[in-house]
Amino acid sequence: MDIVYTGEKFDKNKKICFLAGPTPREESVSSWRGEAIKMFDDLGFSDIVYVPEFRHKSYYDYETGVNEMKFDQDMLERADVVMFWIPRSNDMLGLSTNIEFGYLLNKGNIVYGRPDNAMRCEFLDFLYKEKLGKNYLSTLEDTVKETINVLKRVRK
């Protein structure tokens, strides 16, 4: 498995899974993505997991990070599957995540999960069911497994 972070080079011949969801904006808040990466690895995933964070810090400055945002946007659009995990809380609101979710919904290459106690996800739940006929997954493990299943059906 290749783990690619914001701004890093990647093998364009491999399938890409983009890990979309709230990103910590303070160093005191841990990212959920490390746990997801471990699950992908444990399940033998061999393509690219794209992490829209920096390798050595988990947030960027929106005033100076235009190139990083463009890179992440390009990766979001080129991803074979976008896995949304939305553990929304007061520490990680995921406001950009809402936009990305809506932006990609009609493309159909998304897998959506969230813990049952995530704040204010009811509209995302509704859209996922209404547009794609699917219910959200309620554990990170189930979301990773479904993402791998979807990626297996994607041709590269």
Image: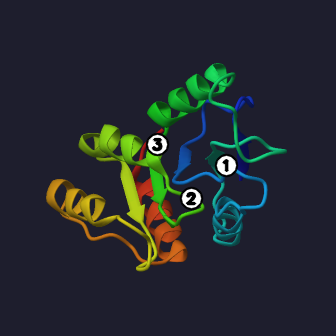
Which residue is labeled 2 in the image?
92
Residue 96 is tagged as: 3
Residue at the extreme right of the image, as rendered: 56
| Cα distance between the residues tagged 3 and 1 | 12 Å
What residue type is disc 2 on? Met
Residue at 20% across / 63% down in the picture? Answer: 126
Residue 16, located in which quarter of the rendered image?
A: top right
Q: Secondary structure at mark 1?
A: loop
Q: Residue furthest front?
A: 90
- Among the 4 quarters of the image, the one containing residue 69: top right
Check whether the beta carbons of the residues at disc 2 and disc 1 lie within 8 A of each other. Answer: yes
The residue that appears at 65% across and 20% down in the rendered structure is 67
Question: Looking at this view, is 142 or 114 the one in front?
Answer: 114
The quadrant holding residue 132 is bottom left
Query: In the rendered image, which residue does mark 1 sit on?
Result: 25
Q: Residues within 10 Å of mark 2 (few under 14, many from 20)?
A: some
